[in-house]
Amino acid sequence: MNLFNFSAEFTSEESCRNHFKLERDKIGVVCVNCQNTTHYWIKSRWSYECKLCNHRTSLRSGTIMQSSNLSFLVWYKTMFLLSVTKKGFSSKEIQKQLGLKRYEPVWAMVHKLRKAMGNRDARYTLEGMIEMDEGFFSIEASEFELAKGVRGKGAVGKSNVAILAESTPLEDIETGEQSTHCRYFKAKVLDGHDAESVDEVLKKGIGKESIVISDKSNSYVNISDYVDIHLVEKSNKNTTKTSLKWVHIAITNAKRQFLANHHKIQLKYLQLYLNEFVYKLNRRYFGEKLFERLVIANITGL
C-alpha cells in the first residue's frame, strides 16, 4: 500500500477499527472461556459476545494490540511505516513521524510487531534444498562482557546467528546454464557456537526430507541426523558466491541494514530485529499487500 492509498482509506480511528474488525472476522474469534467460535457483535462496546457463555472479547483482546493504550490509527500508521520500505525505520524515527511525545510506548509497539512477525514465520518450515551458515552480528556489549574482555568467536560485541535459505537449483533448458532461485529464509540467534544450538534450529525450522548444504564447521556435526542429506562444502570465496550464495547475501544485507538504521543492538532484542528483516525478505514480492499481511500478523501473532 502506498502513501496515497493509505491516507485515503485510513482517515480516522473508526476507519482503522472497522478494517481491523473486518480482517479479524475473516480469521475468526475463539472464546477464551468455552472455545466457541460464534459471537454477537456489540458495536457500542466494540466487543464480541459469545453466543454460548456470553463472555465478551474486546476487538484488541487476543491480538498484539491487547492492553495497549495507543489508538488504532497510531498502530495502523506504524504498520504502514514498517511495511512501506524494505529497509524499515528505527523506533525513534517512527516516534518522530507519528509526532508522539513519549518514546517508550512507540518502542514497545514496534517490538510487539516484530515479535508478531517472528511468530508468523515460525509457523512455516523450510523444505527442499537449504543453504545454512552463521553470521556474527555486532551488538551492544554489557558492562559484564566489557569487564570480562572475551575475544575470538565469542568476542565482546558479537552475537552468533544461524541463517538458512531455501533455494532450488534451476537449469536453463536451452543453454544448460545453472542458476539458483531463492525462496524463503530463517534467522535464529544461537545460544553458543556449538552443535546443540544448531540442532534446536534444525528441529523447529526445516523439514526432515530436506537437503542441507553447509561448510565444515564443528557445530554442524549432527545435521545429518535431522535431514535426508547433508552436503559439506569447504568454506572459501567460491562457496560464498555459489553453493552458499544466498545465506551470505542475507547476512551482508542484514548487517548493512542494522548498522544504518539501529547502530548497535542489545543481544536480548537482536532476534526481534532479525524477525522484521526476515519477515519482509520472505514477502519481498508481496508489494502493496505487505501492509495487509502485517495486519493479519497483528491479529494472529500474539
Image (cartoon, rainbow, N blue to C red):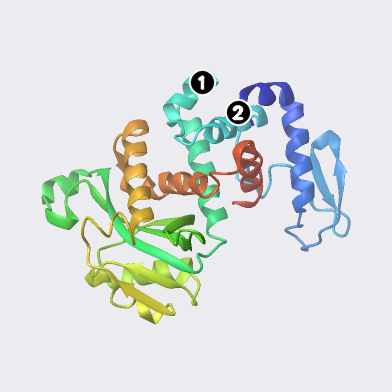
Q: Secondary structure at mark 1?
A: helix
Q: CA distance from mark 1 to mark 2?
A: 9 Å
x 81%, y 61%: residue? 36
Q: Say what amino acid the circle numbered 2 marks.
A: Lys
**Left-right relation of 32 to 101:** right
Q: Who is closer to the viewer here, 229 or 207?
A: 229
**Left-right relation of 260 to 167:** left
x 35%, y 68%: residue? 213
> Residue 68's x, y, as percent?
60, 37
Crowdedness near tag 2: few (<14), some (14–19) or many (≥20) residues, C-alpha within 10 Å: some
**Left-right relation of 186 to 221:** right
> Dividing the image into 4 quarters, which one contains the N terminus?
top right
Q: Earlier in the sequence, mark 1 or mark 2?
A: 2
Q: Who is closer to the viewer here, 281 or 97?
A: 281
Crowdedness near tag 1: few (<14), some (14–19) or many (≥20) residues, C-alpha within 10 Å: few
> Residue 279's x, y, as percent?
51, 48
Q: Is residue 100 visible?
A: no
> Residue 105's x, y, as percent?
50, 32
Residue bearing the label numbered 2: 77
x 55%, y 48%: residue? 116
Q: Who is closer to the viewer here, 80 or 299?
A: 80
Q: Quadrant of residue 130?
A: bottom left
Residue bearing the label numbered 1: 97
Q: Secondary structure at mark 2?
A: helix
> Residue 292's x, y, as percent?
66, 40
Query: Do the residues under discs 1 and 2 have CB atoms within 8 angstroms?
Result: yes
